Amino acid sequence: MTVCTALPGNGRQPTEPWAKHRWLPNASVRTRPTGGKKGRKRSLLVDARGVPLSIAVSGANLHDSKLLDPTLARVVVERPEVTGWKDQQYLCLDAGYVGYPVSKIARKHRYYPRVKSRAEERLIKYRYPDSKPRRWVVERTHSWLNRFRKLLVSFEKTEASYTALTQLAAALICWRQTTSIYG
């Protein structure tokens, strides 16, 4: 009597070449994309002290420049009227915001875009030691938001609930900043 060792249900997996599954090349079937980003992305507009003025939230697979318009549209503070070139408000952006569409969106919201790479900022700091760096202010505000453990890892099902939690955290940050200023 012979016993077959590759029968289904006996706990053994056949390893012969005839048992291995091969992918057949098929030009009509599209390959599933890999590497899609999971998670959420926050876009912030802050003042010179790092107090959040506007927040926009979306999926992490969206480019930063696509979030500029919603971020600038949700500003919660009324801006003063621009009367001259000295009153122009600058919008400091990183190198991900290069291009005409971004410049057009910034000018629509009455901002003058200033896009600088990290190398340009280092060069300016080297040439003008008294100049203030600007990028770290936004990074510090992101760090303040990440201290809220509910925002660090997003377990929220909907984008609206995550946006509400982010706005609540931003309100708490604003409260902490005003109490430190006014005692």
Image (cartoon, rainbow, N blue to C red):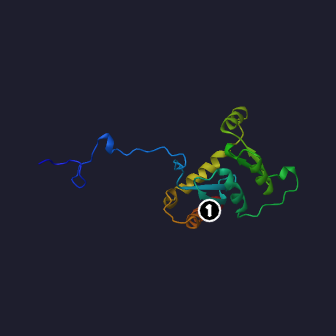
Residue 138 in picture, x, y percent from top left:
63, 50
Residue 152 in picture, x, y percent from top left:
51, 56
Rate crowding at label 1 as few (under 14), some (14 to 19) or many (20 or more) other CA atoms within 10 Å.
Answer: few
37 or 1: nearer the viewer: 1
Q: Does residue 82 appear left or right of residue 50 in this picture? A: right
As drawn, 117 above or below 50: above
Q: Toward which corner of the image does residue 53 lie, by quadrant?
A: bottom right
Q: Toward which corner of the image does residue 74 lie, by quadrant?
A: bottom right
Residue drawn at (88%, 53%), measured in percent from left and top?
Answer: 84
Q: What secondary structure is marked by label 1?
A: helix
Residue 138 visible from this viewpoint:
yes
Q: Residue furthest front?
A: 1
Residue 3 in picture, x, y percent from top left:
16, 48
As drawn, 143 above or below 158: above
Q: Residue furthest left?
A: 1
Badge 1 is on which residue? 179
Q: Does residue 85 appear left or right of residue 158 in this picture? A: right
Residue 46 visible from this viewpoint:
no
35 or 21: nearer the viewer: 21
Residue drawn at (52%, 54%), measured in percent from left and top?
Answer: 38
Residue 42 in picture, x, y percent from top left:
60, 56
141 or 66: nearer the viewer: 66
Amino acid on which the number 1 mark rests in the picture: Thr
Check the picture and name the quadrant holding the C terminus: bottom right
